Image: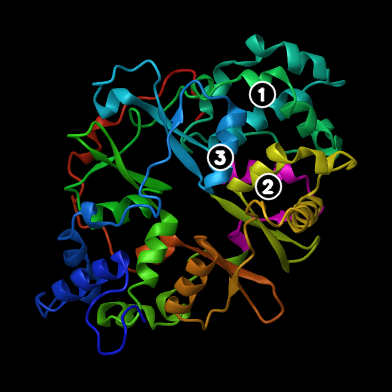
Amino acid sequence: MVMEEGCQTPRSPEAKVGMQVEDLWDIQEPQLSPTEKLNACFENIPVSDFPPAPSNQVIEIKSDATLAEAVKLLSQHKILGAPVVDVDAPEDASWIDRYIGIVEFAGIVVWILHQSEKMEGTAAFDFDSLITGAENILSPALAAAVNGVSSPRFRSMHPESPTATCGNFFETLTSSDLYKNTTVRDISGSFRWAPFLALQKSNSFLTMLLLLSKYKMKSVPVVDLGEYKIANIITQSAVIHMLEECAGLHWFESWGSKKLFELGLPLMKPNNVIQVAEDEPVLQAFKLMRQNGVGGIPVVESGGRRAIGNISIRDIQFLLIAPEIYRDYRSITAKNFLTSVRKYQGEHEKNSLFLSDMVTCRRNNSLKEVIMKLDSKKIHRIYVVDDMGNLEGVITLRDIISKLVHEPRGYFGDFFDGVLPLPANSRV
């Protein structure tokens, strides 16, 4: 429960938002359906009411920061991405001129995969060319490594390819001048929005929820036009926490108490779940994420459907920050990756990074129970399994929101008129 018994004061800013919904719920027209009521409620709450991050500070990365520095900063703050500030922008620049985009682990994955492509295409890969040929490798293909937007169609990785069998690839890559000298600005060249799609403080919660669900944004920046900067970044995890803090309220319980199967969840059939076998190269997992536009995939036993782990897009950090743990591997398979990272975390518990947990549920769990699990682990993906641990589907925050609100006809109007055409050299 979000409130003490007999007390009407919310215990958290998130619970306060839930109370706003509760108050608005009671005054909606009785003939409206529950979804229509929630649509109306969230439409009447501005995103400026969404609580800021705990640190009350938006993490930003300078455009001249190296990839190594960006990875370290994202890892330290346990975030998927951060806005990139143009170091050459004047102090009084508007927000659209102040930022050049958002750098994410998803974009860095594309950059890494491009390096592996070069390696796969060379019979005998020369690591010296990787170290000394930075100016030649920074090709238009690197421009795809931005904002989780591009979807390059990579060749299927064969288990015997050089990248799959070379255990020291990442140690060599991260010690190279290329990795040390490539800047965030170097890999940012194609954005679907200029520099990214953002909300103003007056926009509604409904708009924010739809952008995170139907329009597949990983996070939603909220800009302060008067301050010329980003005032808040609303993440998927923050929305899940907000929903968790609403437990006990009438509007939440009437929706969250329903079983997953009653809501038609999971939406995806078991055979359509993107997955990687335990003996496949770990880079194949990241390729599949990029090709299918998903943030994580399950690792399953070879020849079966039993899930043994989860790899998230953010887990690429373990290949970049602690590459020495794979030095002795002939093949960095998905299973080897999970085993090595867990061992590494056990040995560095105090300063441990975050390996995405494999969190599961059953079809007869309630949506409320799922939200509680997601919030406790600070993730936004849960796998549905049967009694034998076999995969039956996956549920993400997007699926949850789709059962909470819907997009009214013509709702966004000219909202997306700022969309710019992608550069000709973009691999999307």
- Residue 284 is one of the magenta-drawn residues: yes
Query: Quadrant of the rendered structure where residue 92 is?
Result: top left
Nearest to the eye among marks 2 and 1: give it.
1
Query: Quadrant of the rendered structure where residue 342 is?
Result: bottom right
Tell me how far mark 2 sits from mark 1, CA to CA. Answer: 22 Å
Task: Tell me the amino acid under the disc marked 1.
Answer: Tyr
> Would you say residue 217 is visible in this rendering?
no
Q: Position of residue 150 (x, y in %)?
A: 50, 34
Q: Position of residue 340 (x, y in %)?
A: 80, 52
Identify the residue position indicated by label 2 in the image. Answer: 285
- Asked whether 231 or 418 is in front, the reply is 231
Query: Quadrant of the rendered structure where residue 105 is?
Result: top right
Residue at left offset 54%, top offset 38%: 73
Work out whether mark 2 precedes mark 1 in sequence or the reverse, and give the earlier one: 1
Identify the residue position indicated by label 3 in the image. Answer: 105
Q: Give, as a single range, the part of the protein colored magenta.
A: 271-293
Where disc 3 sits, the SS reads helix
